[in-house]
Image: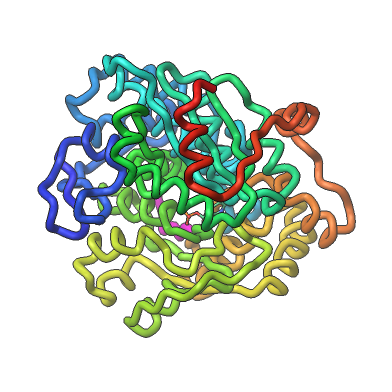
Amino acid sequence: MRYYSTNQKALPVSFRHAVLKGLAEDGGLYMPERFPVLNFPAGTPFSEICFEVAKSFVEQEIPSPILREMIEQAINFDAPLRKLSDAIYVLELFHGPTLAFKDFGARVMSRLISYFVRGLDREVTVLVATSGDTGSAVANGFFRVDGIRVVLLYPAGKVSPIQEKQLTTLGENIVALEVRGTFDDCQALVKQAFRDLDLHRKVQLTSANSISIARLIPQCFYYWHAISQFAEPGSVLISVPSGNFGNLTAGLIAKRMGLAVESFVAACNSNSAIPQYLATGKFEPRPSVQTISNAMDVGNPSNFDRMLALYDHDVYKMRKDVLAANFSDAVTRAAIREIFEQYGYVADPHGAVGYLGLKRFLEKCPAGTCGIFLETAHPAKFAEIVKEVLGQPVEIPERLRQCLDKEKNAITLSNRYDEFRSFLLSSW
Ligand SMILES: *Cc1c(COP(=O)(O)O)cnc(C)c1O
């Protein structure tokens, strides 16, 4: 399988190249040139689905037994589909180590990078700037992975206390840098390091980019898993709480590969560039606005180019597969309450946005249509909001409690590049 750039200027590349580069030389995003058709009988084990889907993208570039082991180690947790009513199901994607769906992409990507850099004579340093969730999933994904060390940069005082614990308590091959500045400063430091050729001669750097195809592919796994649990594939709608649209794009790729889904719902908070595009045909990215579903506070979704590539830049074609809606914080809070009162289920703000998107369109579907919304984070990650809305505390899962009990371990730096650079060159 070759991967082309959505900007169409760079030449298609191997899977290895796409994984190690992250972004194409022309600034585009990598997309597979073909979409192999798949089909899983009802009841196929999740591990088998994960392996087969991965295999269809990786093909011969990694021997099957190695790929199978890699995927089994990465996805060592489940993605259960829970029934809330005859028509509504929730797909829980928060059973990984950091309690958010980004564990799927991060854990597979880290193992792919580790495999592809094997044989290089020095350690590879992964730089990650994070405003919270992505960093902990990526750091956890690389934790104890051979030949790799991770430098995480986060803005001091601008991540939640739980997020900070998740970022700063791993240790071993993971170092957390608390930067006195903003998330944009952190990102600027990482970008400058990637442009610094002299630094490259001394330190082998690689990116664990959020737009890497290696993160997208594992996000297809659970869509197949969810649909394969319906004995009679009827008409199914899947609602995806979306920010950068990686999760939704993975679903659209799965649909192109034969996944039996009627439509996807792009469920957004007040950051509504894509719902507006689908309504008007015009894409007008805006600065992001802050909401209670903050992992979706994205004004200019990075996977939009992949969505355009999938539908030949044709909004009419995209509308056949993608419905979209956006919801305010007030409506999202009311939804958290409604889901609890009607179904006894505790949803986090992101899942609640997904639920709202599902409800909006399920009502318009023929009787017998089933709906699935994705729950992308455990409610304990957003405990303050959920507690405030439901008037009762959220249960904290054991794996989160363990990390909360550990000591924070971070190195404080200013936002100056020379300081960051000396740090990278020091033997920490
Ligand atoms: C990242 C994230 C999202 C948004 O996913 P995208 O792939 O960026 O659309 C939704 N919910 C949670 C909890 C997230 O961490």
Q: Position of residue 390 (x, y in %)?
A: 84, 58
Image position, residue 19 (x, y; %):
29, 36
Q: Check the image and report above or below for 139 versus 266.
A: above
Residue 220: say if magenta: no
Q: Which stretch appears magenta?
A: 233-239
Q: Point out residue 321 in the picture as x, y percentages from the top left corner.
A: 34, 65
Q: Quadrant of residue 197?
A: top left
Looking at the image, residue 363 sits to the left or right of residue 13; the answer is: right
Q: Residue furthest right?
A: 391
Residue occupying the point 60% across, 67% down: 356
Residue 38: x percent and y percent? 26, 40
Q: Quadrant of residue 219?
A: top left
Between 352 and 306, the residue placed more toward the observer is: 306
From where the camera sits, is residue 90 visible?
no
Q: In the figure, 250 relative to 298: above or below? A: above
- The answer to whether 252 appears left or right of 151 in the picture is left
Closer to us: 382 or 364: 382
Q: Is residue 207 above or below residue 286?
A: above
Quarter of the picture holding the N terminus: top left
Q: Residue furthest bottom?
A: 280
Residue 299 visible in this rendered orientation of the protein: yes
Quadrant including the C terminus = top right
95 and 404: which one is in front? 404
Here the colouring is rainbow
Q: Residue at x 61, y 42 (%)?
A: 413
Residue at position x 31%, y 36% in the image: 198
Residue placed at 22% from the left, 43% from the top? 37
Task: Name the residue nearer the viewer: 380 or 291.
Answer: 291
